[in-house]
Image: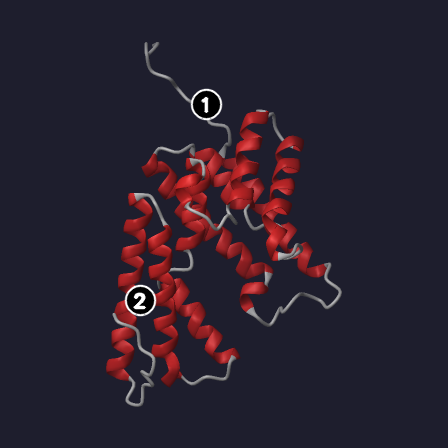
Amino acid sequence: MVCVGVEIKQTEVTDADFTEMKQFVRDYLAASVEAEDDGGRMRWYPWHSAAYRFNHILNVVDLAEEIADAEGADVDVVRVAAVFHDVAKLEADQDVHAEAGARVAREYLQSRGAYPESFIEEVAGAVVDHSYTGDLADVPLESRCLMEADVLDKVGANGAVLMLLRMGYESRTHMDAAKMVDRVLERGRDHVDRVVSDTAESIAHQRLKRVRWLREWLEMEVAEMDAAGVTDR
C-alpha cells in the first residue's frame, strides 16, 4: 500500500546500532581514565569518573529524546549527538572537549555503517554546539534539544543528591544540607531561564518542585538546620 503525499523517514540508526554506540562510549571513557598518568583525574571525586560520566550521558540521552520527540526534531541526530557529547570529557580540557567529542563521533560514524555525510555532520555539529554558552534560540533545533537535556540533568533530585554528596568531600555536616540544596535551586532557576522549548521548561519546573519539597522537609526534620543564606523559595 502506497501512502500518497506522506513522507516516510527512514530510520538512520537502529536500536542495535545505538547499543553498540553506547558500549563504545562506555569503553572510551574507561580507557581515558586508565590512560592518565595519575591513574585517573580526581577519581575520588565521583563526577570525574568514567562511571559517573557515562551515567550522565545516559540521562542526557533520555531527556534529549523526550524533548526532540515533543519538539519535532530529528530524534536520530539528537540521540546520537547526546551519546557522544561528553565522550572526550575525561581526556580533553573543558574548553575543547566538545570539539574533541565531535571528532570522535565523526570518526566512529564514518567507519561504521553507511550513514549519510549530512547526518554525520549534523551529529558532529550538535556535539560541538553543546558547550555553547549563548542564547539557545540561536542554534539549530537538534543542538538545542541536546543542550536543554544537558542542562536539565543538573536540575532536580539528581542535582540535589550530587550536591549533598559533595558535602562529604568538603567535610560538611547534614546540618548544612539546606544551604547546599539552595544552591541547586539557584542554579536550577538559572537553567530554567535559559531553556527555550515548552517541553524543557515543563521538565525543569517539575524537577525544581522536587528540590523545593526536599528543602522544606530538611528544614522541618533537622533540629539544628543551618539555614543561613537561604534563598527566596
Which residue is located at x 33 percent, y 83 percent? 228
13 horizontally vs 74: left or right = right
Query: Residue 211: which numbered mark, if any?
Result: 2
Residue 192: quadrant of the picture? bottom left
Q: Quadrant of the N terminus?
A: top left
111 horizontally vs 186: left or right = right
- Mark 2: few, some, or many residues within 10 Å (few <14, many ≥20)? many
Residue 67: quadrant of the picture? top left
Q: Is residue 226 visible?
A: yes
SS category of the residue bearing label 1:
loop
Q: CA distance from mark 1 to mark 2?
A: 41 Å
**Which one is earlier in the sequence, the residue at label 1 or at label 2?**
1
- Mark 1: few, some, or many residues within 10 Å (few <14, many ≥20)? few
Q: Residue 179's x, y, as percent?
A: 36, 78
Circle 1 or circle 2, nearest the eye: 2
| 226 lies above or below 28 | below
Q: Residue 51's x, y, as percent?
A: 56, 60
Q: Residue furthest bottom?
A: 224
Q: Residue 201's x, y, as percent?
A: 30, 50
SS category of the residue bearing label 2:
helix
Q: Quadrant of the C terminus?
A: bottom left
Q: Residue 128's x, y, as percent?
A: 56, 43
Viewer-closest of 3 and 219:
219
Which residue is located at x 51 percent, y 80 percent? 170
Circle 1 is placed at which residue position? 10
Viewer-closest of 196 and 91:
196
Tell me the amino acid under the disc marked 2. Answer: Val
Tell me the amino acid under the disc marked 1. Answer: Gln
